[in-house]
């Protein structure tokens, strides 16, 4: 490794991982969330039921040209590469801050900025879950990059104690785009505010640039605010309920924390520990404020996990922790404390490679495993095309499923046919396609991975206002089996259901 500078190794490592993402992007179909956000781009709007609009807007140029999953996935792959570069830049800026504030022992033993940045990038490359975000676009994929940009501007503020007008404009744009990407960007904004509040001098509040940045941010998120005012604030009401989850339990918090270690790896945790042990005493107030970019969202999501949560919600926080971890690991490496660093890196890379192979194989169906999660990634293109063909052949008014997670892939692959969700949960499909009209006939799609009873007169389903609804008849007309490498992954059943009607009240 001494033959090449650390920056060259960082570039090489990022490119190798990006090539793997590129290959996987063409090998598997859209996941449920990917298809959902791709539909955003097909139905451009100022905002959407469950998320702000940037995740749809950013895909629109490619989706308007192609429906190929691999090409559309160039967007998250590029965001991942830029985020790794962002980690590299933030690490270098953090290194400069430490050197500028401390001229003693720590500075003399601290490795070069590029060496620290390389270690930070390797923490991300060795973490399993970020590879998922590099292949499938989620709002978090965008927020990661923007959070790193805001953190970079925060470090520059601490170092320079002032901003030029252009710096304030950039900061306002970053904050506004973060607000357009995901509502949890408010945690990143809170971390930025703490950096300002903990700074010894509060000159920022008297600077016109600060208020200009605030106005720019508000202007950029104004489409979301306007859309919600015209839709009874459904996004905010949904997110509050979604974040609260179900009844709170400590076991869910423990499961969440364990899953976080598995998803992001112990290497980045070890690096953060080493940084806090060896480097935190340098510019303690500033460092604690900057650690808020990790600590604030992580603590909030950990607390909310008692009611339920998803592991990728903390992704921006972990990317913001990586620069600290890189400095801690690089310092330990330079002092020849290398065994655990090598071991954890090898174990995590091995886990990533096993995960890639597991996805490509289609998973494993055994009696010991209740369900095969990888089966969800295969068969939807064929099912969507078959559903569109059967719906048109039988003159159905559209396609119906009984859960939104089934609807996103069907709606994507059966485009432009309307897809109706037959449940009482309000969601984005209600805004796109409305409720299924009475007396309609539709093609009902049932997936064996999430089976439902057919909603006929003897088994009606509840509507949103207390009514019961059912079809007069559901006649099976075809089924298909999804196979990969000789194993059956799942199956799809297609039924023609006629005369959708109200049957009474519950």
Image (cartoon, rainbow, N blue to C red):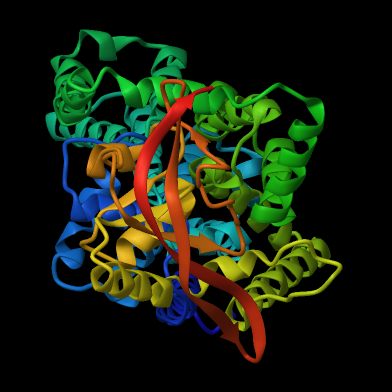
Quarter of the picture containing the C terminus is top right
Rendered location of residue 415, percent (x, y)? 24, 64
Q: Residue furthest bottom?
A: 486
Quarter of the picture containing the N terminus is bottom right
State the image quarter where residue 448 is shown. Answer: bottom right
Rendered location of residue 278, percent (x, y)? 71, 40
Q: Is residue 91 above or below residue 135?
A: above
Q: Nearer the viewer, residue 115 or 254?
A: 254
Q: Nearer the viewer, residue 25 or 193?
A: 25
Image position of 134 (left or right of 417)? right
Residue 386 visible in the snapshot:
yes
Q: Nearer the viewer, residue 64 or 474?
A: 474
Q: Nearer the viewer, residue 105 or 486?
A: 486
Rendered location of residue 20, percent (x, y)? 49, 79
The residue shown at (29%, 19%) is: 233
The residue shown at (18%, 13%) is: 207
The residue shown at (78%, 61%) is: 370
Q: Is residue 331 above or below residue 209?
A: below
Q: Residue furthest right?
A: 368
Rendered location of residue 182, percent (x, y)? 36, 36
Image position of 268 (left or right of 250)? left
Residue 164 visible in the snapshot:
no
The residue shown at (41%, 78%) is: 382
- Number of numbered discs on residues: 0
Image position of 179 (left or right of 263)? left
Q: Is residue 265 above or below residue 233?
A: below
State the image quarter where residue 339 is shown. Answer: bottom right
């Amino acid at each position: 490794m001494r033959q090449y500078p650390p920056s060259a190794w960082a570039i090489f490592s990022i490119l190798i991982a990006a090539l793997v993402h590129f290959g996987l992007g063409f090998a598997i179909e859209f996941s449920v969330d990917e298809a959902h956000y791709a539909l955003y781009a097909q139905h451009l709007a100022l905002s959407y039921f469950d998320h702000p609009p940037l995740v749809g807007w950013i895909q629109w140029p490619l989706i308007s040209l192609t429906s190929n999953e691999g090409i559309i996935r160039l967007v998250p792959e590029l965001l991942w590469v830029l985020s790794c570069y962002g980690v590299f830049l933030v690490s270098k800026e953090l290194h400069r801050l430490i050197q500028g504030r401390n001229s003693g022992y720590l500075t003399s033993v601290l490795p070069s900025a590029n060496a620290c940045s390389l270690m930070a990038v390797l923490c991300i490359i060795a973490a399993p879950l970020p590879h998922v975000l590099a292949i499938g676009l989620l709002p978090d994929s965008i927020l990661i990059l923007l959070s790193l940009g805001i953190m970079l501007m925060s470090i520059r503020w601490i170092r320079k104690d002032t901003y030029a007008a252009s710096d304030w404009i950039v900061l306002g744009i970053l904050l506004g785009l973060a607000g357009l990407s995901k509502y949890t960007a408010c945690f990143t904004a809170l971390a930025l505010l703490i950096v300002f509040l903990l700074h010894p001098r509060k000159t920022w509040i008297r600077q016109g640039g600060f208020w200009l940045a605030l106005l720019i941010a508000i202007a950029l998120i104004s489409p979301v605010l306007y859309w919600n005012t015209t839709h009874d604030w459904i996004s905010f009401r949904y997110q509050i309920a979604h974040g609260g989850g179900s009844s709170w339990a400590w076991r869910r918090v423990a499961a969440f924390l364990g899953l976080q270690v598995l998803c992001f790896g112990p290497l980045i945790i070890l690096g953060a520990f080493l940084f806090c042990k060896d480097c935190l005493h340098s510019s303690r107030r500033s460092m604690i404020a900057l650690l808020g970019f990790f600590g604030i969202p992580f603590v909030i999501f950990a607390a909310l996990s008692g009611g339920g949560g998803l592991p990728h919600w903390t992704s921006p926080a972990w990317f913001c922790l990586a620069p600290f971890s890189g400095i801690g690991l690089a310092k330990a490496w330079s002092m020849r404390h290398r065994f655990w660093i090598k071991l954890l890196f090898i174990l995590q890379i091995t886990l990533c490679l096993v995960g890639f192979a597991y996805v490509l194989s289609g998973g494993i169906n055994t009696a010991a495993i209740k369900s095969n999660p990888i089966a969800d990634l295969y068969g939807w293109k064929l099912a969507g095309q078959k559903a569109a063909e059967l719906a048109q052949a039988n003159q159905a008014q559209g396609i119906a499923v009984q859960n939104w997670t089934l609807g996103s892939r069907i709606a994507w692959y059966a485009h432009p046919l309307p897809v109706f969700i037959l449940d009482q949960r309000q969601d984005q499909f209600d805004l796109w396609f409305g409720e299924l009209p009475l007396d309609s006939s539709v093609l009902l799609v049932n997936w064996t991975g999430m089976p439902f009873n057919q909603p006929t007169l003897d088994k009606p389903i509840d509507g949103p206002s207390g009514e019961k609804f059912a079809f007069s008849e559901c006649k099976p007309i075809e089924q298909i089996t999804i196979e990969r490498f000789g194993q059956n992954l799942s199956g799809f059943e297609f039924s023609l259901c006629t005369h959708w009607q109200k049957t009474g009240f519950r």
